[in-house]
Every structure is written in C-alpha cells, then in structure tokens.
Image (tube, rainbow, N blue to C red):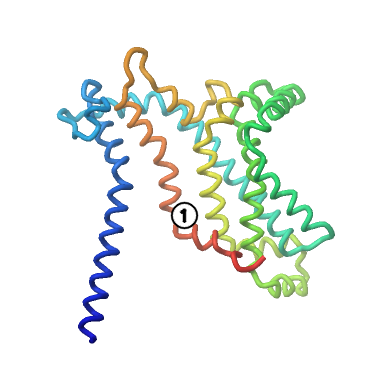
Amino acid sequence: MTAVVTRRAGATTWVRFGLLLAFVVVFLIPIYVLLATSFKPLTEADPGQAWNLPRTWTGEAWRVAWEKLSPGLWNSVLLAVPGALLSCALGSMNGYVLSKWRFPGADVLFTLFLFGMFIPYQGVMIPLVQLLVKLNEWTGLQGVFYGGIPGLVLAHVVYGIPICTLIFRNYYVTIPDELVEASRVDGAGMLRTYWSVVLPVSAPAFAVVIIWQFTSLWNDFLFAVFLTSPTSWPATVMLNNIAGAQATPYSQQMAAAVLASIPTMLIYVLLGRFFMRGLMAGALKG
C-alpha cells in the first residue's frame, strides 16, 4: 500500500512539474522572439522569420535603440522614482491616520478616497490639462506643470492616492492597537508614534506600493502624450515613435522594448519577495 501511495505521489509531482515547465515555455516564447529579433540585421528582421535565430548576429539594433530611447529612459526615471516615493509617503500617512487615529467621518472620507480609483483617465483629461495650464500661469513657470515632468508626476501622485491609501490602511489594520496605545501612554504623539512604531514595520506595504506605482508611472502613455512636450516624453512614448519611413525596423523596436522593460523587471526582482505578503496583509481584517 505504501508503495502504491509513493508511486502516485511521484506521478503527481511529475505532472505538476510538466505543467509548470509548459507554462514557463509559453511565458518565455515572446521573450525569445524579442531577443532573437533584436540581434538580427534589418534584412532579416521581419515577421516571416520571427522564430528563426539570426544568421548574422549584430548589436546594431541595440545601439540605435539606445540612442533613440536614452532621453526617454532618463525622463521615465525622473517621473517614476519621485512619483513612487511621493505616493508611498502620502499613502502611508493617510493609511496610518485612517486605521489608527479614528475621527468623526473617517469611514466616509475613506469611501470618498476609494471612489477615486474608479474615475477613468479619459474622464479627467481635459480638466487636468486646464488645471496644469493654470498652474503654469499662476507660478510663472512655463513648461513645468503642463509640458514638463513635474506636472506628470503631480497627476500620477494624485491619481494614485486612493489605491496607495487602501493598501497602507489594510496593512496598518493588522498592526496591534496595543502598540499604538502603549506609545500614547509613553507620551508619544501622532507623528512620533508613526515614525517610531508604525514606519519600521511597514516594509511589505511600501514594497507593494513602490512596485504598483513605479510600474504604473513607468508604463504610462496616455497622460504622457497629453501632458508633456516632446523634450519630456518618457520611454513609452518614444518607444511608440521608433518607426521607419519606408519599413518598420523590427530589430530596433524589439531591442528598445527590452531596454524599456528592464527597470520594472529589476523592481520586481528586488522587491518581489515582499509583494504578496504586503498585498495579502489585512485581507482577513479591516
């Protein structure tokens, strides 16, 4: 009987392994096509030869893609890094107040925050443009808010407040109230409690919000097209504009696509182990 159970367990393990391997292969097929095409000369880079390895290996497409895309990559860094950090800071403070420092109307305010998650980008595009144009006029900083990276950061930070607040609020609900009460007894105020008690245990929630917001900011296309000038275009807009006049340079497009995706992959690799723990925190409470 034990031998039969062992054989069944072994067969089940091999079936699971085979299914996982099949999923991995399916997942890697687009990456294979990207990389194989990116190392082909333009004469070989066409859809009919997408599955073939290059007959002549060349890095010319990577050089051209880097020259065309590097200004956009730097603009994306200037957009995604401060935008993600500001979203983390605001979301963390909002979530802390809404979960640990209750006040009249807190639930209503939290519900209003959540409504912001369901407003489509297209619905606010015209008033958002008008607001940023007015900010340029009021501050005298032409091309900074409307037409520049700061305005794009502002739009994404404001739009990201609802989801960031939700993630942090659900995470902070899992922190025992006794810790906050103990800090109050010791004489700590709201900010001191946040800085000394809550913030040191917030790494998983910060990882989730950084991954979420960094990815959203880095992959933004719609806001970037409407709110920035060509000198401030991020990588996604410049990636869309890599095209030839007579023929499509597939190898350059593939190389540029890989270059544009590297930062988000690095963020997931560095912070991924915190992602599920922070995302699931508060799923059973709050």
Residue located beneath label 1 in the image: 271
Q: Position of residue 261 (x, y in %)?
A: 41, 39
Classify 110 as above or below 259.
below
Q: Pinpoint residue 172: horizontal percent, then vertical percent.
A: 65, 63
Quadrant of the image occupied by residue 41: top left
Q: Is residue 27 left or right of residue 96?
A: left
Residue visible at 76% across and 71% down?
184
Which residue in the rendered view is the most extreme toward the bottom? Answer: 1
Name the spot of residue 276 as percent of width and height, x first. Answer: 49, 60
Which residue type carries mark 1? Leu
Residue 120 quadrant:
top right
Q: Residue at x 25, y 25 (%)?
A: 45
The quadrant holding residue 263 is top left
- Quadrant that contains the N terminus: bottom left
> Where is residue 48 drawn, in percent x and y?
23, 27
Residue at image position (61%, 50%) is 88
